[in-house]
Amino acid sequence: MAPLSKFHGQFVKEQVVQLIRQFFLTKNFHEIDTPTLLPSLPLEPGLYSLSTPWRHRQKNFYLATSPESSLKKLISQGIGNCFAISHAFRDLENIGPTHNLEFSMLEWYEIAKNYHHIAQTTQKLILKIFQKILQKQGLKATNILKYRGKNINLSPPWPSATLQQLFLKYAKINLAKNLKNTSGDDPDWEPWFTKTMIDQIEPNLPQNRPFIIYDYPTRLSPLAWPCPATAGFSQRFEFFIANMEIGNAYTELTDSTIMQKNFQKEKLYRQKHHLPLHLYDQTLVKATKKFPSCTGIAVGVDRLAMLFANVANISQVLYFPTAKLLK
């Protein structure tokens, strides 16, 4: 095999994007070019936006934190299965090995399906892209991803557990009881949850397999449908490969009243605790009144490229990482 180009990681990302597009177009999904500048955004816990003024109209616009709200508005109008590969921007996250201020996100939606269905599509997509990239490099297709000294078996079905099961097993915490006994207005709860995930849950996930974690607290999942049998939890999963969170999926919330309450609750919480706030998307709330039952997922394209290029830092798959722009 030829020596690796100095642009190896960037070229692998290029292939990932091309293969994602090919995968969904062959399934007759509509590809949507979503806007980067938006007058309002969904208001979700832990997700903060960057803004820019439109001086001509004396109005603030926000850089999209994901293509989610734009895609959902089209779904409410009947567009059907669709996907977008777009740039997203997040404030209050420092740059690092797996974070960049501006990053590429794949998001897609499947009509009349739930989060278990989209988990199956996800597993097929990841394996197919990986095998196609191997073929492009003149290598034999296999299910074993070699990443930083680890052999990771991508064969479906991937192992999984609920978040409640993992908290009980590794942190000895009954998460359902904790949610019941903790005020939703407690500013310390979310940092505690994040720290517990990073310190006690994620290090115990399998190193040789991707892993899916199902059913997250509703207070962290305002756009996901509640679990019918588990109060305080919603139909959301995240999947991890090599200890990196790669994707985040929901059975989508179709109740506009609940969505409005969730956004309003987050707004009041941020005002009370002096946290950055942006206008929340009232058009999305209205569109949800016509929203069909469906499921959606967001996948970090740059992190996927990192895995398939076997590189340790997100800057190695970007031509212009934020760290480079700051020099």
Image: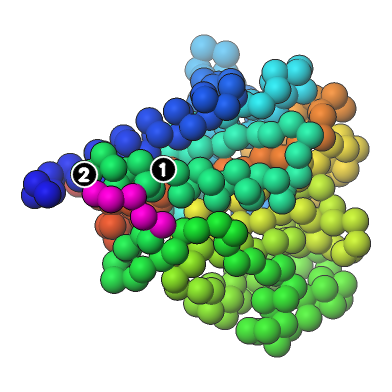
Say which of 277 and 158 sits in front: 158
In the image, residue 17 sits, relative to residue 313, either above or below, namely: above
Q: Give the residue displayed 80% in from the left and 77% down from the top.
A: 178
Specify whether 189 is left or right of 154: right
Measuring from the top left, give residue 199's x and y in whole percent. 53, 78
In the image, residue 244 sits, relative to residue 74, either above or below, namely: below
Amino acid at the residue labelled 1: Ile
| Residue 325 picture quarter | top left
Specify whether 96 is left or right of 205: left
Local packing at callout 2 (Cα closer than 10 Å; few below 14, some 14-19, many 20+) is few
Q: Are the residues flagged by discs 2 and 1 in contact, CB closer than 8 Å?
A: no
Local packing at callout 1 (Cα closer than 10 Å; few below 14, some 14-19, many 20+) is many
* Nearest to viewer (mark 2 / mark 1): 2
Segment tinted magenta in the rendering: 139-143
Residue designated by label 1: 129
Secondary structure under the numbered disc 1 in the rendered image: helix
Q: Do we see residue 191 in this rendering? A: no
Q: Give the residue displayed 51% in from the left and 37% down from the top.
A: 106
State which tag comes first along the sequence, 2 or 1. Answer: 1
Specify whether 282 is left or right of 261: left
Q: Do we see residue 134 in this rendering? A: yes
Q: Would you say residue 117 sits in the magenta stretch?
A: no
In the image, residue 295 sits, relative to residue 157, either above or below, namely: above
Measuring from the top left, give residue 225's x and y in whole percent. 81, 47
Secondary structure under the numbered disc 2 in the rendered image: loop
How many numbered circles are shown?
2
| Residue 182 picture quarter | bottom right
Q: Give the residue displayed 33% in from the left and 50% down from the top.
A: 141
Measuring from the top left, give residue 166's x and y in whole percent. 67, 76
Residue designated by label 2: 138
